[in-house]
Amino acid sequence: MDLRPYLDGSVAPRRRSLAEALDGAAPGDLASLVWDSSEVVLRDGELSVVVTRTDASTLRVTTSWGAEQIQQIVPIPSRPLLRSELDGALADISRPLHRREGRWFDGLPLPHGRGQADRIVPAVAPEELGDPGFRAAHGVQRAYIAGAMAGGIASPELVIAMGKAGYIGFYGSGGLDLGVIEQAVVRIKGELGAQPCGFNLLHNPSEPAVEEGTVDLYLKHGVRTISASAFMGLTPAVVRFRLAGLHEQDGEIVAPNKVLAKVSRTEVAEPFLRPAPPKLLAELVASKAITPRQAQLAAHIPIAEDVTPEADSGGHTDGRPLSVLVPVFRRLRDRVQAELNYAVVPRIGAAGGIADPESLAAALTLGAGYVLTGSVNQCTREAGTSPLVKEMLAQAGYADVANGPAPDMFEIGAKVQVLSRGSLYAQRSQLLYDVYREHASWDDVPKVQRDKIEKQILGRPFEAVWSDTERYWTDRDAREAKRAQEDGHHRMALCFRWYLGMTSRWARTGDITRKRDYQIWCGPAMGLFNDWARGTPLEAWESRTVVGIADALMTGACVVLRQRMALG
């Protein structure tokens, strides 16, 4: 109701009496009169109304009619926001807003106020995003994971920083010696105590003993949470970890060990969403790794209560879009849950391409119960890689990536996504794979091509590489060394894998002489993050911390979600 025609001295036309206008007025109509002053007077004949702002939340309304006078205290609804103020109000995630009659106001609508709010934007906190079951299961404040980047890039410092801030980070144990992993486990658990932390279990098809040894180490030190990555199917090692300590308590099954499976295909995800297969259980019982009773209990729990579909990401990836994977994985989960009726419904997360508030908010909108970031975290102060690599990553655009053969799955042609800007890893590793596929042994490769590979890629004679490789495998697994001595094709594979494995080490140590060979796992998300961070305190990698990035992305996602609520 517009009361301005009754302002003292107004000459605006009046369509009804002031008394009638007051009957139809809401507190907001009175408050609008004193937005720019502390007191106004309304007049209509003998009737006068003095409206005074007493404080930020109330008005004093003094009505006079002849000798009679009535005084009322009226609560002030929030003043309407100017259009120029709305963006700032939405960015203040602790500030609820509502819209009424086309105008935005601070706060929630008064319960008995006139005028119906047609839209409400509540306060949104990062602690409220995602699945509360995820936060409870892992003892974290926020449903956000810093993923396990292999080779110790997801370093002890990174995991410790995340755990102390109420998040969970996973140590990147893939490709490291067991002694190095053990030192990291002891340090991380020693500093974090009961605070959340996790460790990677990277599938190793060529050396299953490495998986088994890693699980032995984790069980020895009481590790409770692992991230199972690069798996193509269930292995005895991951099942053994999950079932260790499985027991009943007060009629309920208690599984102290948690597995988060990071996968990119539903055919790989489904075995993780189901109980361990009977054949594997029988083998574990026969080897006395688990008891017969644990095998019975295992039929009622999934291998993983958290399954993370990994979209277009750094490292091992199928390059699928997150907008496809999350809904498909959720429907798969729902079908399995309807069939098996677990006491705890498995959660579906999201990884790959999450690097700014919009992409994080999109993942949550798709129904992800939590998010996992990777590429962006290796460009932080805590990441276990060289300053030169961090500088290269900080300059990357979303298209500065390429695919090259993976060191751990070279013979089967599996690939990893890497940074292409400033490195020739993708091209050089592909050339080695093509040579391996086309020739039965190194001696069969034309001399011109052999010379080129030795000079431009290996950086040394093939026989020198084989000498080091033979010594390495003789100590690690003599069967591999013996096979390579007898099989020239296998010898070539092992030597080429030497190069592929060294490229990531040269990157982590910052060997400037091998910069063109660097294998830097990286997805388009790195470029997305750099684009978003441009012009902000996070632009320079020296200013980036893993917790600072997590906080910025989670808080930014809250802003994005509030903006979407406002737009409707």
Image: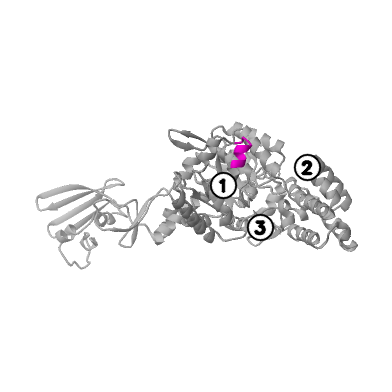
Residue in the picture at 74% in, 55% down: 411
* 48 up-or-down from 128: above or below: below
The picture places residue 407, in percent across and down from the top left corner, at 73, 52
Identify the residue under disc 1: 277
Mark with earlier residue (2, 1): 1
Characterize the magenta stretch by its predominant secondary structure: helix
Mark with earlier residue (2, 3): 3
Q: Nearer the viewer, residue 15 or 162?
A: 162
Residue in the picture at 57% in, 34% down: 192
Give the structural element (helix, strand or loop) at label 1: loop
Position of the C terminus, as image quadrant, is bottom left
| Residue 548 shows in the view | no
The picture places residue 323, in percent across and down from the top left corner, at 52, 60
Marks 2 and 1 in Cβ contact (< 8 Å): no
Q: Nearer the viewer, residue 16 or 464?
A: 464
The picture places residue 414, in percent across and down from the top left corner, at 69, 57
Outermost residue, right side? 447
Q: Which residues are magenta?
A: 282-289
The amino acid marked with disc number 2 is Asp
Identify the residue under disc 2: 477
Marks 2 and 3 in Cβ contact (< 8 Å): no
Give the structural element (helix, strand or loop) at label 2: loop
* 244 up-or-down from 424: above or below: above
The disc placed on residue 396 is: 3
Give the structural element (helix, strand or loop) at label 3: loop
Was residue 283 drawn as part of the magenta stretch in this picture? Answer: yes
Q: Nearer the viewer, mark 2 or mark 1?
A: 1
The Cα–Cα distance between marks 1 and 3, rounded to whole angstroms, is 44 Å
Say whether residue 475 is left or right of residue 385: right
Say whether residue 98 is left or right of residue 413: left
